Amino acid sequence: MQSVAQSLGAKHFKVSYKEQTESYINKKGVLKGKGNGVQAEAKQTVDTKSRYKMNIESEMYFSGHQPFQPVLQYLNNDPAINCLISMRMAEEGDFQKQNLEIKLSDSSGLNKELSTKIDDVLSKFKFKLETSMSQQFKKESNSSLIYEIEF
C-alpha cells in the first residue's frame, strides 16, 4: 500500500490496523452418584476471561510528484485500490485526499438457555450418575483497517 501511495504521487500516507478480541467463559458442573450405599456429589465452577489487543501503524511523508501507474503484486484484485488508482491517473479528475476505514466484527456465544436444554437431554438418559452442565461463552472480535492518503 505504501508503494502504491508513493507511485501515485502522495505527499502523506498513513495506514493502521487495529484488532481487539475479548472472550468470557463460565462453566458450572455438578456430578452426583450413588452406589454401594454411598452417595457422592461434586461441583465445579470455572470463570475464564481473556483479552487480546493489537495495533499496527505506519505513516510516511513524501515530496509528492506526478502520478505513474503502480505495479500491483498483492492488491491487483482489490476494487478500492483499483478505483483509487483510476481516479488518481485520470486526467480530468483531481482529488486531494481519501480516507477509508473497513470495520469487521464477529461475536458468538453459548448462553445459559442453550446449556439448560443440553442438561434436559442429558437427564433423559437413565444412568446411575446424574450430571448437569451450565456454560456461558461469549467471544467478541473487532478489527479495522484504516488508511489515509493525501496528494
Image (cartoon, rainbow, N blue to C red):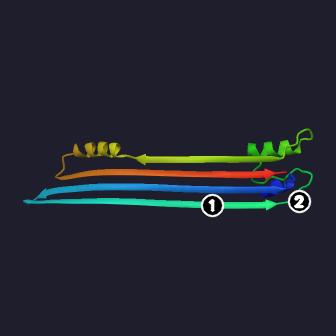
At 50% from the left and 51% from the top, the residue drawn is: 140
Answer left or right for 109 relative to 42. right
* Amino acid under disc 1: Asn
Q: Dot 1 surroundings within 10 Å: few (below 14), some, or many (20 or more)?
A: few
Number of numbered discs on residues: 2
Q: Closer to the camera, 144 or 30?
A: 144
Characterize the local packing of mark 2: few (<14), some (14-19) or many (20 or more) Cα atoms within 10 angstroms. few
- Disc 2 is placed on an element classified as loop
Q: Quadrant of the N terminus?
A: bottom right
Q: Nearer the viewer, residue 11 or 67?
A: 11
Horizontally, is 147 left or right of 54 in the view? right
The disc placed on residue 14 is none
Q: Residue at x 80, y 47 (%)?
A: 97
Q: Kindly report the distance in space between the C-alpha atoms of the residues bearing marks 1 and 2.
A: 27 Å
Residue placed furthest toward the top: 92
Residue type pointed to by label 2: Ser
**Rendered location of residue 96, percent (x, y):** 84, 46
Residue labelled with disc 2 = 63
What residue did someone put label 1 on? 55
Expressed as whole percent of the image width and height from the top left, the position of residue 112 reads: 33, 46
Residue under the image location 60 percent in, 52 percent down: 143
